[in-house]
């Protein structure tokens, strides 16, 4: 009996302490841990160029429920950021470039690839000049493939890089400065190579001085490649000499075995006036797309082939079944006719398919420089048209204060999506744009600054063994642009129902934490709940009194331990309960 009384006393004492000071949830101030902020850069207008393109450094692709931003910033860092479809930054990591010269990025179906390289001025055939690094979709390194020598002194020079894949083979179309030729010069040209993705083995490569029958172009100032629905390799180049113009190539044999088979058909989509080899062509090539019946190329060009003359946007359509220059139809989309410095000219257009036979063409206005067309945006008007099968286009639509960048727009959930960055806008953080039939929307990425528990959970006192119940808990996130929102998706930690007393439960969300307090109590033992209603009260006294009256009480109910169960035990129980 003494043990029972001691146990009851301990329970009552714990209960009194809980009532006195531990029944209220306390909200703590937000605590910042590893603030998650988007990487800053300046990519707007970087797809425009005067004479030759540069490698694309900004990429965006959809991966399930998230958008992934991949961007090479500086000379050695590649940032990888995941965003929600509402453009909220979810995660960020930084990769180190394995070789010092950035080439490009490709998001494959099952893996991701980063292409980098290094110079080879000594013209050493045993020196690695290009490396393709394979990552899984979480950017864990899986392997790499390398080109050595490859008639290359400077990889990716005066041009760009783009990829496509089919049947487990990755095709890379890019450019390079070549070994010294007989005239003592290091000329520039395109190059193409393929990689077997399963074991990252180089399968084929073309990098020597060739002819157009194998898809060679020199100089080649911008490069595009795709594998069409029939399995043929299709490439687009901006040439200034051999040939001088926009040139479209298609392989004679289908791709997929890793080899090029050395033969392709060639179509000169647009000839550029001017001297052979003159780097100034008055043009920029902006994109390649496929329809069910043909191929589309977009570019901007003037009629002089050089200098400050205004450029216009053109769309070419080449039928698949008549892959010839005579069958190619070119449509002029714009009519920039001004001659003054302040008169607008067409920037480099982009083409974005939204279906097998439809999509968008977009461009910004630019202005000519004082001595040479520099291709830099001077205002922020965005123009766009839609296209349909056969290269037909809609009327031009214009939206003010919208930029393009070197981020190729992607088509996600029925909308075009791209981003731009600029140090003078949103502090260099991305601004995401979406475009569909209803119009255009801009969303500046905001950075999370803190979180706070703004409403306590309904349940704050627990018995041993009970599970945490977050019903009623409200957590608010605060952002650097002054906005706030109630969030979910947080995690709770620190609760242990086997540990008695007050506990701190931590709320974690994207590197930030807040907390609240709960109390865990020992499960109460009801020694005198005679009527089984889970409460020790006057009803239990009445219950015992009734048993004393009708003499049905049991020896265990001799609470005063005098050998009999009588009214004195009823009085003892009443004192204990009250």
Image (cartoon, rainbow, N blue to C red):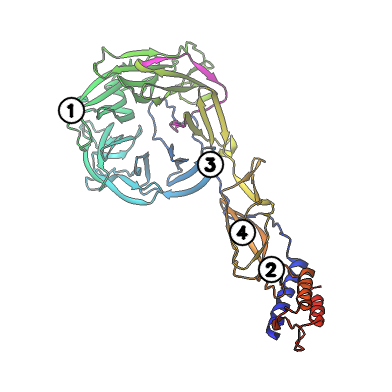
- SS state under label 2: loop
Residue positioned 53% across, 18% down in the render:
398
Asked if residue 11 lies in the magenta stretch, the reply is: no
Q: What separation in Å lies between label 4 and label 2 (alpha carbons)?
A: 38 Å
Name which of mark 3 and mark 4 comes first in the sequence: 3
Name which of mark 3 and mark 1 comes first in the sequence: 3
Part of the protein shown in magenta = 391-413
User: Which quadrant is home to the N terminus?
Assistant: bottom right
Name which of mark 4 and mark 2 comes first in the sequence: 4
> Percent x, y for residue 223?
33, 29
* Residue 305 visible in the snapshot: no
Q: Is residue 280 left or right of 230 when viewed as pictured?
A: right
Q: How many marks?
A: 4
The foreground one among 202 and 371 is: 202
Q: Is residue 147 left or right of 20 when viewed as pictured?
A: left
Q: What separation in Å lies between label 3 and label 1 (alpha carbons)?
A: 44 Å
The foreground one among 297 and 212 is: 297
Q: What separation in Å lies between label 3 and label 4 (alpha carbons)?
A: 31 Å
- SS state under label 1: loop
Q: Is residue 120 left or right of 467 when viewed as pictured?
A: left
Which mark is on residue 506?
A: 4
> Percent x, y for residue 219?
29, 27
**Counting other residues with Cα less than 10 Å from the Cα at mark 4, is it few (<14), some (14-19), or many (20 or more)?**
some
Q: Is residue 7 left or right of 265 when viewed as pictured?
A: right
Q: Which residue is mark 3?
A: 40
Name which of mark 1 and mark 2 comes first in the sequence: 1
Q: Which residue is mark 2?
A: 532
- Whether tag 3 and tag 4 are in contact, CB under 8 A, the answer is no
Q: Quadrant of residue 59?
A: top left
């Amino acid at each position: 009996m003494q043990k029972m009384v001691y146990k009851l006393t301990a329970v009552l004492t714990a209960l009194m302490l809980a009532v006195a000071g531990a029944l209220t949830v306390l909200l703590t101030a937000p605590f910042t841990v590893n603030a998650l902020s988007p990487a800053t850069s300046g990519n707007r207008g970087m797809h425009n160029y005067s004479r030759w393109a540069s490698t694309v450094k900004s990429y965006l692709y959809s991966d399930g429920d998230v958008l992934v931003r991949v961007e090479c910033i500086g000379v050695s860092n590649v940032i990888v950021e995941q965003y929600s479809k509402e453009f909220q930054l979810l995660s960020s990591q930084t990769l180190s470039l394995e070789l010092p010269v950035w080439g490009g990025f490709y998001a494959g179906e099952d893996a991701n690839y980063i292409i980098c390289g290094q110079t080879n001025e000594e013209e050493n055939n045993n020196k690695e000049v290009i490396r393709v690094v394979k990552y899984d979709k979480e950017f864990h390194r899986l392997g790499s493939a390398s080109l050595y020598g490859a008639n290359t002194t400077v990889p990716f020079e005066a041009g760009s890089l783009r990829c496509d894949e089919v049947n487990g083979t990755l095709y890379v179309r890019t450019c390079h400065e070549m070994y010294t030729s007989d005239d003592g010069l290091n000329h520039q040209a395109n190059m193409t190579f393929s990689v077997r993705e399963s074991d990252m083995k180089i399968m084929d490569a073309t990098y020597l001085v060739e002819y157009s029958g194998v898809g060679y172009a020199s100089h080649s100032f911008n490069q595009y490649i795709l594998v069409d629905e029939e399995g043929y390799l299709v490439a687009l180049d901006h040439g200034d000499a051999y040939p001088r113009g926009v040139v479209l190539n298609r392989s004679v044999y289908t791709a997929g075995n890793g080899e090029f088979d050395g033969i392709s058909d060639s179509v000169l989509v647009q000839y550029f006036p001017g001297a052979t080899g003159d780097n100034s062509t008055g043009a920029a090539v902006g994109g390649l797309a496929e329809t069910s019946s043909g191929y589309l190329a977009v570019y901007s060009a003037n009629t002089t082939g050089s200098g400050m003359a205004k450029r216009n946007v053109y769309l070419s359509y080449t039928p698949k079944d008549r892959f010839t220059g005579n069958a190619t139809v070119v449509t002029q989309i714009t009519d920039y006719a001004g001659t003054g410095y302040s008169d607008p000219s067409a920037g480099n257009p982009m083409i974005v398919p939204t279906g097998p036979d439809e999509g968008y063409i977009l461009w910004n206005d630019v202005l000519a420089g004082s001595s040479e067309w520099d291709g830099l945006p001077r205002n922020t008007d965005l123009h766009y048209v839609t296209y349909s099968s056969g290269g037909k286009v809609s009327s031009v639509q214009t939206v003010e204060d919208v930029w393009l960048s070197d981020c190729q727009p992607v088509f996600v959930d029925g909308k075009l999506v791209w981003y731009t960055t600029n140090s003078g806008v949103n502090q260099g953080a991305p601004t995401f744009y979406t475009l569909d039939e209803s119009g255009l929307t801009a969303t500046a990425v905001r950075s999370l600054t803190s979180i706070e528990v703004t409403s306590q959970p309904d349940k704050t006192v627990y018995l041993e063994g009970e599970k945490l119940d977050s019903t009623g808990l409200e957590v608010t996130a605060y952002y650097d642009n002054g906005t706030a929102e109630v969030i979910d998706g947080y995690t709770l930690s620190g609760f242990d129902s086997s540990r008695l007393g007050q506990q701190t439960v931590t709320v974690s969300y994207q590197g930030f934490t807040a907390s609240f307090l709960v109390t865990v109590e020992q499960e109460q033992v009801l020694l005198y709940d005679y009527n089984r209603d889970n409460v020790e009260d006057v009803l239990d006294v009445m219950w015992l009194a009734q048993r004393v009256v009708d003499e049905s009480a049991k020896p265990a109910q001799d609470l005063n331990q005098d050998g009999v169960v009588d009214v004195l035990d009823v009085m003892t129980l009443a004192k204990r309960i009250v």
